[in-house]
Image (spheres, rainbow, N blue to C red):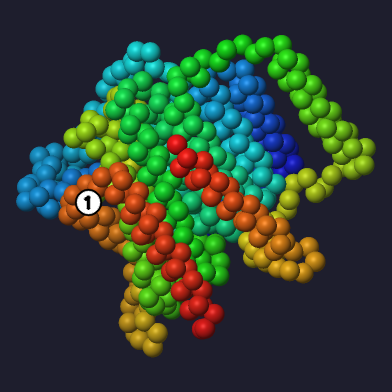
Amino acid sequence: MELSSNLIIFYLLAAFMVVSAILAVASKRIMRAATCLLFVLVGTAGLYLMLNYHFLAAVQLSVYAGGILVLFLFAIFLTNPKGDAAEPHDRRRVVMGIVASLCGAVVAGFIILKQFCLYPVSDTAIGDHEVNMKVIGTALMGTEKYQYLLPFEALSVLLLACIIGGILIARKS
Amino acid sequence: MFSFSIVTQWIDEFLRQYLSSGLALFIECLLVGFLLLVAYAVFALILIYVERRVCAFMQCRLGPNRVGPFGIFQTVADMIKILLKELIHIDRADQFLFRLAAFFVLVASVGTFGALPFAEGLHAVDFNMGVFYLLAISSLGVVGILLAGWSSNSKYTMIGAMRSGAQLISYELSCGLSLLAIVVLSGTMQLSEIVALQADSWFIFQGHVPAVIAFFCYLIAGHAETNRGPFDLPEAESELTAGYHTEYSGIQFGFFYLAEYLNMFIVAAIAATMFLGGWMPLHIPGWEAFNHVMDYIPSAIWFLGKTFACVFFALWVRWSFPRLRIDQLLKFEWKILMPICLINILLMAALVALR
């Protein structure tokens, strides 16, 4: 019962995400595309919640839904209304898009097949306990093996550089 | 002290006697969702009534006093009226996004409301990263406001949405940073543990000066998050008619209205939980008899009492200060409030390290 209800939730989430992903690409109006992208991101957060990785779900919501998507919306607000209705793409972009999506399909298919062949019945698919915040915190801020202080600090320097760069570009005009 | 977990456990056992565990869980989820929505609506009615009476009191007038004793059924009548109103069709607006935007705002607010610890044992979801969850899910509301402003196809709503977006994103930082000071003090993000740690004395007393600073920073930032005066620029009625929800009518406007009032309640409830002990009674170490008497007051009353005290404070502030200008508002956040919050976290960390 537990397994089947998990499956039902997974398929509902997956269907929701696939439909909104297709709508995000197919929509002619840029605002609707951004909203559908938000649905995909929220669906991903739902998948993380289902896997009992609550921290990543909250990060997904606050960073993507609360941060990046709001930036997208602001960018759409500030550009001219020509962007409201997208023009049809030229042939080179269509070909590149098909190549990129084929590459993505190959990668996804490879992962799915590998999963089927190597781990026929995966018990680890549904996490059975919540990852403690303290574990994540010490892993991020520790200097021992499997702890990530250096990448964490490097990322923060990168973000700082981005902020300063953004201000510089904004001040130029 | 009476714990609601007795009731919830009894319901759980009762359902499991007759049903399989999966079905019982499903029915429990439905029950919890239904109860939360009912509580959401009832709190909104109470809050609207309280706000109108308190505003009237602050301005030396009477407020609603005709429908029922002291006018307590006025908001119920208003609710029925708003349910019956026509939904006006907006010409050349994006209908899909226009309808959707109200739900975004509502979902963000219900999602936050659902994770609050209302009383002992009355806590729907107790995540390990509870505080972070509250901040994350409430950030969805900004998207709703931006979409509402854009899809209404009107310049007032557009300007209102831009202002609101800038304001919410800025003040979210101070909100998160001031709550982080308490997370540093308690060493956990789980709301139930945060409440349990305040059994001896509330965090605002335990944390000395940094906790008091964090409390006031949170109240200011939280007040700005709810888009209410003196931070009500997004809907400044003298300039923008009603800001981002100018074009909405009937129950769609009702959704925004509901979410606005409940956001005020949620901000007050988070302040009460994080700083004032949540549902934990007032305990003073050493005063055994006093603590024992305090334990007799039910935990739900403690929680609601603290929350409504914070709500009253918010209303008081609303009618005491004039509205800010947008540049003053943003300058205040980025140049004053956020640096204070950042330094405050350092202070709190030093306090915890020295203890």
Residue found at x 84% / y 28%:
A106
Q: Position of residue B66 (x, y in %)?
A: 10, 40
The outermost residue toward the right is A117
Q: Position of residue A72 (x, y in %)?
A: 52, 33
Between B105 and B219, the residue placed more toward the observer is: B219
In the shown orientation, is residue A30 left or right of residue B331? right
In the shown orientation, is residue A2 left or right of residue A166? right
Residue found at x 33% / y 69%:
B297
In the shown orientation, is residue A16 left or right of residue B272? right
At mark 1, the secondary structure is helix
Instruction: Tell me which amino acid carries mark 1.
Output: Arg
Relative vertical location of residue B207 with respect to residue B100 in this rendering, above or below? below
Q: Which residue is mark 1?
A: B318
Q: Position of residue B162 (x, y in %)?
A: 37, 35
Relative vertical location of residue B88 with respect to residue B352 in this rendering, above or below? above
The outermost residue toward the bottom is B286
Residue B146 visible? The answer is yes
Tell which subunit mark 1 falls on. Answer: B
Mark 1 neighbour density, 10 Å: few (under 14) some (14–19) many (20 or more):
some
Residue found at x 57% / y 18%:
A27
Q: Position of residue B31 (x, y in %)?
A: 50, 43
Residue B34 visible? The answer is no
Residue found at x 33% / y 54%:
B332
**Position of the N terminus of chain B by quadrant:** bottom left
